[in-house]
Amino acid sequence: MIRTLVLASALALAAGLAQAEEPIVGKWKTVAGDTAVIAPCGGGYCITLKSGKYAGKKIGTLAGTGDSYNGEITDPSNDKTYSGSGSVSGSSLRLKGCVMNVLCKSQTWTRL
């Protein structure tokens, strides 16, 4: 009985660690030099600023796996939300926000 409980606990812990290993999860340095944290939330990933002028503000939600993510990104300076995407390559995260998939801006963040 105890052996079964220990095995079940170990499997639950392993499942939690697998999600934490997703490449986008972690702390990132933005172009402005602020720290952003990307963490699992609601079946996807939430982007929250942890330092700088807009500290504490949630600025995006993305969903996906591996190195490709899609969702919404908000510009904290004007509170406008755009269609967004992100791609992870090594210690870099390239974020892109678009208006009607025509006018787009990109930024590259680095992992802290």
Image (cartoon, rainbow, N blue to C red):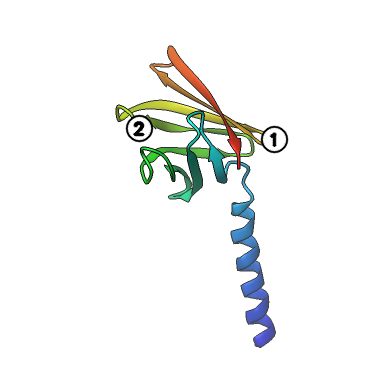
Q: Using residue 110 as the reference point, say whether residue 61 is left or right of it.
A: left
Question: Front-most of 65 and 82?
Answer: 82
**Disc 1: which residue:** 90
Which quadrant of the view contains residue 6? bottom right
| Image coords of residue 31 (percent x, y) | 51, 28
Residue 21 badge: none
| Image coords of residue 57 (percent x, y) | 36, 42
**Disc 2: which residue:** 76
Amino acid identity at mark 1 = Gly
Label whose residue precedes the other's in the sequence (2 or 1): 2
Image height check: is 16 above or below 70? below
> Helix or strand or loop: what does disc 2 sit on?
loop
The quadrant the C terminus occupies is: top right
Residue, x 52% and y 24% (percent of image)? 107
| Image coords of residue 72 (percent x, y) | 41, 32
| Image coords of residue 73 (percent x, y) | 41, 31
Question: Front-most of 71 and 80?
Answer: 80
